[in-house]
Image (cartoon, grey):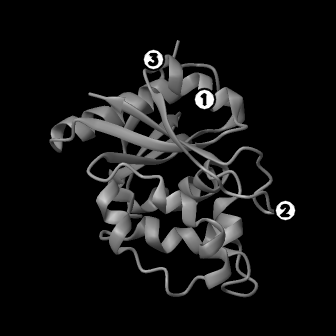
Amino acid sequence: MTAEILIRPADPDDAPAVAPLMVEAGGGIYQFLLDGVVPGMAVADMLMPGLAAREGSFSHRHCAVALDGGAVVGTAHAYPADWMRSVDRSYLPPERLAHIRSFDAAQDWGSYFLSALAVAPPWRRRGIAGRLLDWVEGRARSGGFDRITLHVWADNAPARRLYARHGYIEVEVAAIPWDERLPHEGGSVLLRKRL
């Protein structure tokens, strides 16, 4: 059913298409953290330089894209969880970081971390997310990792069902309070899959 969909590593030119998908996958986290940090700049536009870069955990080199006729219709972004420990967050408002402190506490250090998985609405329920997860699992295995972890909003039932079908189990809950830019109930759930 998805034979016409091509999964390939992302390249710098994919950044304008990948950034909005990552914003969607974040369920408000990027808006919460970045809104107003650069006045007048859209959140997706703020993500593009990092995605286009060759270095850093946000680089396109840690992304796959799903293409339909050359158009990006999905993406996955993953890297070693330990990299989160060295990310520079000094430019982010301290009160916003304090609000999501439990996210950092609910991590499985040493795992391969899936930070984003998104498929554009018209292409959902066609197996594309599963193929992107397969790509991430292949990357994790080739990097010597024995498990993949991710965070999903507790109230995102469709995503939780997808991950459960692919063997991910609940490990811990990060009690992130509701905010108008983070309109979620129940916090964020850390999921894990052993490889």
Q: Residue at x 66, y 75 (%)?
A: 96
Tell me where residue 63 appears, x and y as whole percent: 39, 50
Q: State how far apart marks 1 and 2 are (Cα).
A: 22 Å
Query: Mark 2 and mark 1 in contact (Cβ < 8 Å)?
Result: no
Tell me where residue 30 appears, x and y as whole percent: 64, 64
> Is 87 positioned to the left or the right of 155 in the image?
left
Q: Nearer the viewer, residue 93 or 103?
A: 103
Residue 77 is labelled as none
The residue tagged with tag 1: helix, strand or loop? Answer: helix
The residue tagged with tag 3: helix, strand or loop? Answer: loop
Task: Confirm whether residue 135 shows in the render.
Answer: yes
Mark 1 or 3: the one toward you: 1
Query: Mark 3 and mark 1 in contact (Cβ < 8 Å)?
Result: no
Badge 3: how crowded within 10 Å, few (<14), some, or many (20+)? few
Q: Which residue is mark 1?
A: 160
Considering every residue shown, the one lying at the far right of the view is 180
Q: Amino acid at mark 2?
A: Glu
Residue 180 is labelled as 2
Tell me where residue 38 appears, x and y as whole percent: 67, 86
Q: Which residue is mark 3?
A: 3
Q: Amino acid at mark 1?
A: Arg
Q: Is residue 113 above or below residue 163?
A: below
Q: State how far apart marks 1 and 3 are (Cα).
A: 25 Å
Of mark 1 and mark 3, the one earlier in the sequence is: 3
The residue tagged with tag 2: helix, strand or loop? Answer: loop
Q: Residue at x 41, y 35 (%)?
A: 192
